[in-house]
Amino acid sequence: MEVYLAILIGCFFTVSIYLLMSKYVIRMLLGVGILGNAVNLLIFTAGRITREVPPIIPEELQIPAELTANPLPQALVLTAIVISFSFFAFLLVLGFRSYQDLKTDDTETMRFAEPVDSPKPPLGY
């Protein structure tokens, strides 16, 4: 089960990096969304997925008597879902506003602050 999830996580990371390297803003936004899901799935899988019993310890015991699920990755993933959703919503509004103002989502033509006849900035060091 975890091997298949590892392959799926690798595919998510590959697709998200490919989309983030695009020159179109909408593809970059999709890449950020997929990257957030890949990280959440990675955290959840690293916490060892178990289906035995919920992470509840009876009051009379100090440690669980049997194998239980790990609650920490679940709490981290729930927090990460909220943060990634709010970050994605902010980026979506930012991309929409830039499209409204500049009438394009191509980053090559979004050189609003630079004069048209100026040379392009260096791409490497």
Image: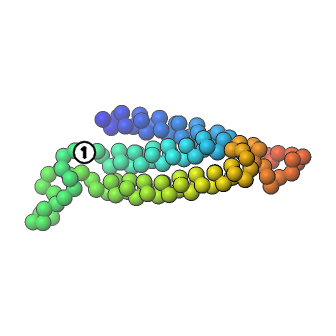
Taking the image as shown, residue 57 lies to the left or right of residue 81, namely: left
Total labels: the figure holds 1
Q: Residue 3, can we see it?
A: yes
Residue under the image location 47 percent in, 58 percent down: 83
Depth check, front residue: 28 or 43: 28
At 83% across and 52% down in the image, what residue appears? 114
Q: Is residue 2 left or right of residue 115?
A: left
Residue in the foreground of this view, choosing between 96 and 8:
96
Q: Is residue 5 left or right of residue 26?
A: left
- The location of residue 102, given as percent across then percent down, is 74, 50
The percent coordinates of residue 34 (x first, y second) are 50, 43
Give the residue drawn at x 64%, y 45%: 25
> Is residue 125 in sight in this rendering?
no
Instruction: Place residue 26 in its image quadrant.
Output: top right
- Chosen colour scheme: rainbow
Q: Secondary structure at mark 1?
A: loop
Instruction: Tell me the quadrant of the picture where the N terminus can be found.
Output: top left
- The front one of 42 and 82 is 82
> Residue placed at 18% from the left, 50% from the top?
53
Left or right placement of residue 46 versus residue 35 in this view: left
Q: Residue furthest left?
A: 60
Residue 66 locus on image (x, y percent): 14, 51
**Amino acid at the residue labelled 1:** Thr
Q: Which residue is mark 1?
A: 50
- Picture layout, residue 92 above or below residue 22: below
Is disc 1 surrounded by few (<14), some (14 to 19) or many (20+) residues within 10 Å? few
